[in-house]
Image: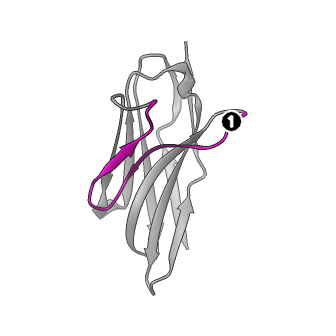
Amino acid sequence: QVQLVESGGGLVQAGESLRLSCAASGSIFSINDMAWYRQAPGKQRELVAEIISSGSTNYADSVKGRFTISRDNAKNTVYLQMNSLKPGGTAVYYCRAHVILYGGYRSAEWGRGTQVTVSS
């Protein structure tokens, strides 16, 4: 059993910053890539940023230069530093991790999400 728990969401004004965290726990042998997605009301879930075990990163064009994804492999935790937030960033932010469990079983796990609201 694997759990991903996000934290750090909240209400901020445009231009301000937030830092999201997502901690994975359970019978985890290792984690390959970790990522942040978001889903705004009435829209599909979209990839915001991802980071693989080597540290390589990938960002959505809409957040490049403003968001930074990082991870602490020892803590099985991924972070998303969000600067210069815009009202369009209002969404539920979800954490996703591709994990390898003890025994070799692989699975894609999702957190329950954390709400980010950016006021203008």
On the rendered structure, is 84 left or right of 44?
left
User: In the rendered image, which quarter contains the C terminus?
Assistant: top right
83 or 51, nearer to the observer: 51
Residue 84, x across and y down, in percent? 39, 21
50 or 75, nearer to the observer: 50
Q: Residue at x 47, y 65 (%)?
A: 98
92 or 60, nearer to the observer: 60
Label 1 environment density (alpha carbons within 10 Å; few <14, some 14–19, many ≥20)? few
Q: Residue at x 42, y 56 (%)?
A: 34
Residue range highlighted in magenta: 42-62
On whether residue 99 falls in the magenta region, the answer is no
Residue 1, x across and y down, in percent? 55, 74
**Label 1 SS:** loop
Q: Residue at x 45, y 51 (%)?
A: 35
On the rendered structure, is 27 left or right of 75?
right
Kindly give the residue lying farthest to the bottom in the view shown. Answer: 103
Kindly give the residue lying farthest to the right in the view shown. Answer: 42
Q: Residue at x 50, y 81 (%)?
A: 105
